[in-house]
Each structure stands twice: as structure tokens, then as C-alpha cells.
Amino acid sequence: MKLHFYLLFSFFLLSSYNLMACTCLFDLNFCENTSTDSKVFSAEVIEKYAGNDLETFMDVKVIEVIQGNFSEEMLTIINHGTSCDTSFDIFEVGDTFIYNFTETPSSHNLANYPIFSLSHCASSFLKKEGNTVLGNIDEEVSSQNYDDFKGEID
């Protein structure tokens, strides 16, 4: 009987906490998250598809490399299905975004192209609508002309 009481008590105690597998110590804006090692580029969302279990994938076509050295014309962004990954719900096929990553693209047996991931704890993407960049660009900056943005990144 004591065991049941402790199990029930533990359940109620833990259920009062919002538990997550990933906790962000800080939330960096795009510029704070961009270093000289970052690869920054604009790309169009081409396709979104499911992998196995919780993984999902999104293929993007590189339009313009803004910073960094890489030659890939197509990349796949992976969401591992954890709370540390950015949800793909905000990305629509045909939309253009500006992405930032530092890791070297790797491979995955279910991905169509070299892969990288987007962190939930730092702004690693911005939306591009026409000639305007939108999102968590810099401290108190959420909208900027694309050419001005590129000049500040270079």
C-alpha cells in the first residue's frame, strides 16, 4: 500500500512541472548566432516529408550564399523530433528563408541531400518576403531591407 501511495504522490508531484527534454539557457537573435564561421544563405523551401519515427525533413534550394564557403545547391534540413528542434509547421513550400548554420552538412539515409538542423534555442532562420527580411534579426530589429541585411552580415 505504501508503494502505491509513493507512486501516486510522485506522479502528482512531477505532473505539476512542465518537463522538457531540452532547456535553453539563452535565446540568441540571428546576428548574435552568426559568427565568421557561419554559413548564411537564402533558400526556397522545395519539399517537406516524414522520415522514420519522429524525424521530419525539409529540402531547400539555395538561391544565394551571403556568407561562408559551400557549394551545395540543395540541402535538407532535419528535425529530429525533439523539443530542441525548430518545428517545420512555420515553413511552407515556396517560401524563401535565410538560414544560418556552422556545422558541416552530413548525410542521412532518408534525406535527399546533405543535412543540417535548426536549433530552437537560437534564431537560425529568418523569413524573406520580397526585398524584406523578417524575424528576430537583432536586438529590437524584426524587419530590414534585404540588401542592408546582407551588408551587415558580410
Image (cartoon, helix red, strand yellow):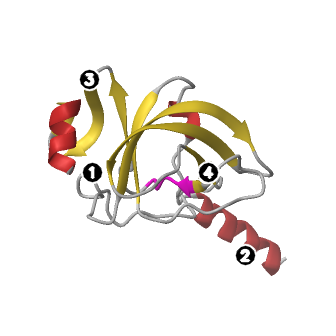
Of tags 3 and 1, the one toward the viewer is 3
Give the farthest residue toward the front. 71
Q: Residues within 10 Å of mark 3 (few under 14, many from 20)?
A: few
Residue 49 in percent (x, y) is at 71, 37
Q: Residues within 10 Å of mark 2 (few under 14, many from 20)?
A: few
Which mark, by number, is residue 101? none
Q: Magenta segment, which residues?
A: 116-120
Which mark, by number, is residue 6? 2
**Mark 3–mark 1 contact, CB under 8 Å?**
no
Q: Secondary structure at mark 4?
A: strand
Of tags 3 and 4, the one toward the viewer is 3
Q: In this orientation, does residue 96 appear?
A: yes
Amino acid found under the numbered disc labelled 4: Ile
Tell me what residue is drawn at x 56 percent, y 33 percent: 89
Residue at label 4? 78
Tell me what residue is drawn at x 64 percent, y 32 percent: 47
Which mark, by number, is residue 131? 3
Q: In this orientation, does residue 139 appear?
A: no
Q: Secondary structure at mark 2?
A: helix
Amino acid found under the numbered disc labelled 2: Tyr
Residue 70 is covered by the magenta coloring:
no
Sequence-wise first label, 4 or 1: 1
How far separated are the C-alphas under marks 2 and 3? 60 Å
Residue nearest the viewer, comparing 34 with 15: 34
**Mark 4–mark 1 contact, CB under 8 Å?**
no
Residue at label 1? 29
